[in-house]
Image (cartoon, rainbow, N blue to C red):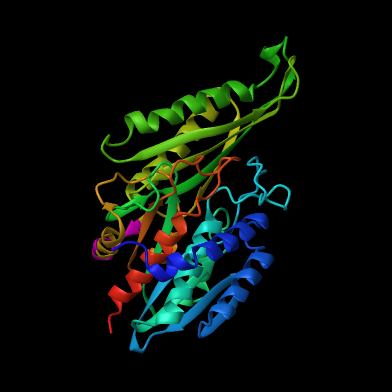
Amino acid sequence: MPVLNSIADYQATLAQWRRHLHTIPEVQFALHDTAAFVADRLRDIGVDEIHTGIATTGIVAIINGQKPGRTIGLRADMDALPMPEETGLDYASTNPGAMHACGHDGHTTMLLGAAKYLAETRNFAGRVALIFQPAEENGSGAKVMREEGIFDTFDIAEVYALHNSPGTPVGEFYTTPGPIMAAVDEFTININGKGGHGAFPQDTVDPITAAVSMVQAIQTIVSRNHYAMDDLVISVTQIHSGSVFNVIPDTAMINGTVRTFDPAVQQMVMDRMQAIVDGQAASFGVTASLDYGNGDPATINDPACTAFAASVAESITSCDTSVSRDMGAEDFSYMLEARPGAYLFIGNGDSAGLHHPKYDYNDDTTAYGATFFSRLIEKALPL
């Protein structure tokens, strides 16, 4: 089954909507112009209910089918990234320091396209809950929407989402049952020593040597403290200390990220990192504190929902379900903790990578994504 003809017929309109969204990128929860544009399009489309102001600027819209039945949730993220754009496009960002570098403008447009088709045809029994979410990139907007009760308020039984994938042919899908994206944690280590002249280190307590030793020891957690077949990434991404070549500073700071799938592995990392910080601090005569923050949990696809969603994708183009899980993270995990569902990727073709200043979402992808959402509803909620 190719792209639905009616969706193909208004693909040019969808591209106009997407490119307008690309010009007005907004970040985290402050998506006022984006949400207003989405709400206006939903009114034009003729959905049955529009609920705004959820998680500040999130939206849930309802489309009723021809008969009563279950409610299926479809989610799109709306936020951009706090980074400059370097595409040179005539529809580039008009908001300095903000850019749709992850394709959320495209995800939003896919869901609007499905909304238009579903509101016109209503070839299903039950309801569709269209979830337009803020703050996926930073702020865990999915968690906030869940905590504000959308799953109970709208009686959502299952929930599905798509994300574009640069380098995958346009319109081709992939996913995997079970864990598909990792839990993401952040750690910061603050080290306090005693500064002084670089020519007289014996009169100081050097925080930099302690920091370097801690970083090296942290890397051994992956190689020596966990089973090699359990996925684990620990990356130290920042070390800050000092300001001039001949002064040993008082303090140093280490920062980084941890990616896991298993809560037991996550706990092991926390315990080992604390032991390393305490032991290295004692060894070098500094004081040090570890601030370990649990971020978004692992994104875990329900096996039955994944098989169903993959069959829908297969009916459109193709869907590879043999892919390995990804060490990236996604706050859709919070929605999958609340309800069964699945997260899939859809090809964006030969584009710059996600979060790159030259990235642009491929408008040819929209019709495939909108068709996927529409067909999923018609197959999940048959008349």
User: Looking at the image, which is closer to me, 219 or 15?
Assistant: 15
| Residue 45 locus on image (x, y percent) | 54, 78
- State whether residue 81 appears in this view: yes
Instruction: Name the residue: 67% across, 49% down.
Output: 90
Q: Position of residue 241 (x, y in %)?
A: 67, 27
Residue 56, image x and y in percent? 63, 70
Range shown magenta: 300-307
Membership of 141 in magenta stretch: no
Q: Is residue 195 left or right of residue 104?
A: right
Quadrant of the rendering where the C terminus is positioned: bottom left
Q: How many marks?
A: 0
Taking depth in this image into account, of 78 and 114 the one nearest to the observer is: 114
**Does 68 appear above or below 348?**
below
Could you tell whether 67 is left or right of 102 in the image?
left
Assign the N terminus to one quadrant of the image: bottom left
Can residue 152 be seen here? The reply is: no
Quarter where residue 340 is shown: bottom left
